[in-house]
Image: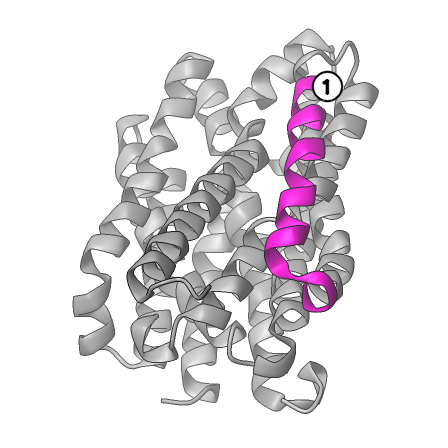
Amino acid sequence: MTASPGRLREKKAIACGALGIAAALSMASMRACDALLPALSSDFAIPVGVAAQSISAFVLAYGFLQLLYGPLGDRYGRLRVISAALAPCSMANVMAAMAPSMTFLALARGLSGAAAAGIIPLSMARIGDTVPIEKRQQIRAVLSERWARLILLVTVVEGLFTLAGFAFVPAYLHRRFGIGIGASGAVMVMYGGGGLAYVTLSSVLIRRFSLGGLAGLGGALLGSAFAIVAGGSRWEWSVLGCFVGGLGFYMLHNTLQTEATQMVPQARGTAVGLFAASLFFGQALGMALAAVLIDSFGETSLFCSAAVALPLLAFAFGKLGPG
């Protein structure tokens, strides 16, 4: 017996809601250690750069496993693979919470990242399967296309500067201004606030700006955000900086993300997996470089580098890409 159109719409809405919850929780697990770097450094008697392994282990595993989950989603179905990834992700997060050493924590975080890798990118691919492009934001083989290669390259650099840069903001606020770990982590909530502002304004922004214009504006806001954080004489400036950074990131990243879902429609899971892998390979590389840079010159050097690189990156993307 065929289900009624109303029943089908209801099932689709429930599935989308469940995907949204799963994606939000997997992203929360990804960012769980950002604000804890000072505490991990103190508890395990290690430098902040070494404590950052709790982040880099997650994103390395997350990035590498995209190369597996994308094809699996194309072969066996997106929802089936997403469902299989949820339980081990939860178990690994419990292991991380009980970690007795930095080595154990890094291992648990790596396992968490390996499982979480099967959630958000395949959810994006699922949406791409079911929602027409005009209702979202306005390739032979992926790597054979110039546009696809540009998207992936920009995504690597975006992850290197943006995700790695903001990961060290709580530790910077704790060290420079002496505010508590909870308060420094709470400042980062404004990054999410900037993302919500983008969601609220997205329909207006998409109508007003071209793809290149929206990406360029996002890069400019990201550069301004890092400049505000680096140059602020009081910690309160970072509240504004994180809000502007969240708004700018989603302007740039959602533009890249939407284009990534269209790179290879017939193998969307693989294409989106490659996109996500590029983002988190960039973050993993950024975390490794940032640890060296920060231990030698402090967090401000990282923020200033991002303030210069991100506007240039977004401007170049806007010029080289389609209107």
Query: Magenta stretch mostly in which secondary structure?
Result: helix
Label 1 residue SS? helix
Taking the spot 49% from the left edge, 28% from the top edge, the residue there is 172
Magenta range is 73-95
Residue 147 rendering spot, x and y as whole percentages: 56, 86
Viewer-proximal residue among 119 and 137? 119
Residue 25 rendering spot, x and y as whole percentages: 50, 35
Q: Is residue 179 above or below residue 9?
A: above
In the rendered image, residue 310 lying in the magenta stretch gets the answer: no
Residue 41 rendering spot, x and y as whole percentages: 66, 16
Quarter of the picture containing the C terminus is bottom left
- Residue 292 in view here: no
Q: Is residue 163 above or below residue 269?
A: above
| Amino acid carrying mark 1 in the image | Met
Circle 1 Cα neighbour tier, 10 Å, few/some/many (<14 / 14–19 / ≥20)? some
Q: Identify the residue position indicated by label 1 in the image.
A: 95
